[in-house]
Image (spheres, helix red, strand yellow):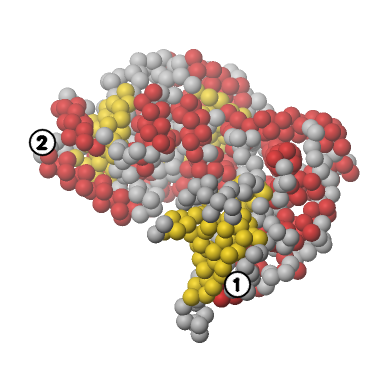
Amino acid sequence: MNLKDNISCLRGVGAKRAEALKKLNIETIGDLLWLFPRKYEDRRNVLSVMEAPLDTDVLISGRVVTAGLSGNPYSRSRLLKVLIEDNTGTVQLLFFNGKYLANYFKPGAEFVFFGKITLRNGIRQMTHPEFHKPGDKGDIRGLIPVYPLTEGLTQNQLRSWQLELMEKHAAEEAAEWLPDWIVTECNLCSPAHALSNIHFPKERKNFLEARYRLIFEELLTLQTGLFYIKNGSRGNANAVAASKAVSVKPFENSFQFELTDSQKKVFAQIEKDMEQEKNMNRLVQGDVGSGKTAVAEMAMFKAVKSGFQAAMMAPTELLAKQHFASLKRDFEPFGVKVGLLSGSLSAKERKAVLESLKSGETDILVGTHALIQSDVRFANLGLVITDEQHRFGVNQRELLSAKGRNPDILVMTATPIPRTLAVILYGDMDISVIDGMPRGRKPIKTFARKESARGKVYDFVHEQVKQGRQAYVVAPLIEESEKLSCRSAEEVFEELRAKYPDIRIGFVHGLMKQNEKDAAMEKFAAGETDILVSTVVIEVGIDVANASVMVIENSERFGLAQLHQLRGRVGRGSTQSYCILISDSESRVAKKRNEIMCQTTDGFVIAEEDLKLRGPGELFGTRQHGLPELNISDLVRNAEILETTKNIAVELIERDPELSSPENSGLKERVRKMFGDKIQLRL
């Protein structure tokens, strides 16, 4: 059986099932072999009838005592009742529509059964258990694979097809493709052994060998491809270079605060990059409120005073307007002209902005996605800054960069990512971390409260407002129903308005038009609203130094990283700020989240904990970072293998930079398949 054969050559795979398999990206025998189990059911221990626990999946064996059909003899949907026994007791098996099995369960025959035993009217019962007659094909004992499913497929079908592949030695068609020195040095089993034992492991040792091999080869392919992407994106000879003669000290001295050591260190890395002939490609990670914008402004000053223009792309119009206002304030004393391009400009205003940009009169342009439109032309773009990178696709960043001659690229994100993951998710970038907070900032105090304390919580908020502060109240998105969440937020809004008629309360939610949302947020930013009740639309958005309280209703409905991002909307001034989590949830994960939030304000600690609670798939969708989907690997749980494969990839490429030797042809083919046209080398 050839791995490239169509899946329809398997028994039982007709047009409908082939279509269902296609939804799992399975079209060939090889595709099916590489559909790995997502977990295993341990069915190695056969329990006696009386010791088997109730209401949980168990494996039992027994002899058939009686088997008979009940109901109308002319009906197709007849109930088959089978009584089985072992040396400890009896169990009644129920099979609906069981007419076709009536002659199979002959008295005295021995069977093995897997399913849940329930107790009904004092009788132990199993409904539709899996069963196997010793000696027949398709044993249900052992470590049994559980596969990803889609409509129209069952576990038994997939197991049966995988078993057929094993019987026809399809796994043996998987030839060794890694160089001998890697197989020996890393003590890897063969691909055939790995494929056989990932599907039907006989022993735990075999399973672990198989799993290690398959994870290793997938991560080695990933690391090798990332190496070429990273190095292929560097070293453009015609890249812009900022002048070493330009000092940013006068601009730095104009700030009303002193930079932290971390900010200074990160800017030194940026400045060094900008002065090189090769273009900069750097990610700056900094917790909410760590001072990333000040560092970005210094980079813009360096670019502009070196004769280049700078562009800053923000994820929302509101954030773009905020950046524009602060940049205009900071740059005007230095004769630097800042422009704003957003979707809400009139045609006349837009035309004026574009002409000023094209002529070189505008030095810095701030905007949203509007910056990447085809009619936006720069005179001499030298620096591109994107804010909150996780809101932009890689392609949008590239479209903006294409408006200059290989400009320097600076990406800022407030989403703390553990370094191991950051190196993978942003494999084409150098990474800087701002890990301190501006001087004078007081850590936000976080408290978890039950719903019974809600009245006291809002009295505290009222008290803060009376002292001249402002507050946010966030209600969650309930599942994916925005309408439902808006009603929930609306209830809070109406309740607060009725209880505290002496304060001004605003309301914003995801179903409002963009201009309505912006108007509500701008009123809050201007101090015309005391409390802003909102859904998570404020997660990325306004920066209001006077806001000192964040109340999060039903906090159990938010992820840890999301809670931290919301908390980061307060604590931006010198006043003591508070975050209050309201929840009655008894969920272990929800309680753990609240506990972590109350213990630390360090975003990187929170990111690590969130990974433990949720895993990387939920946190960092690899597609949004332009990365291939992984089949068996886990970037967090397999961190050690990730590090090993990185070192192997470096050594391998040092030996053979273009993977041109015959022993590396298999790896080259897999890198091509994994990354497609993202790798612009002679691979």
Judging depth in this view, the residue of 361 and 213 nearest the camera is 213
Task: Please identify the quarter of the rendering in which residue 577 is found.
Answer: top left
Left/right placement of residue 54 relative to residue 200 reads: left
| Residue 119 visible in rendering | yes
- The location of residue 397, given as percent across then percent down, is 55, 42
**10 Å neighbourhood of mark 1: few (<14), some, or many (≥20)?**
few
N-terminal of the pair, mark 1 or mark 2, is: 1
- The location of residue 152, given as percent across then percent down, is 57, 67
Relative vertical location of residue 58 with respect to residue 529 in this rendering, above or below: below
Task: Please identify the quarter of the rendering in which residue 460 is found.
Answer: top left
Residue type for callout 1: Leu
Residue at horizontal 17 percent and vertical 35 percent from the top: 455
**10 Å neighbourhood of mark 2: few (<14), some, or many (≥20)?**
few
Q: Secondary structure at mark 2?
A: loop
Left/right placement of residue 72 relative to residue 164 reads: left
Residue type for callout 2: Asp
* Residues at discs 1 and 2 in contact (Cβ within 8 Å): no
Residue 502 disc label: 2
Q: Residue lying at the far left in this picture: please name it.
A: 502
Residue marked by disc 1: 101
Task: Please identify the quarter of the rendering in which residue 151 is found.
Answer: bottom right
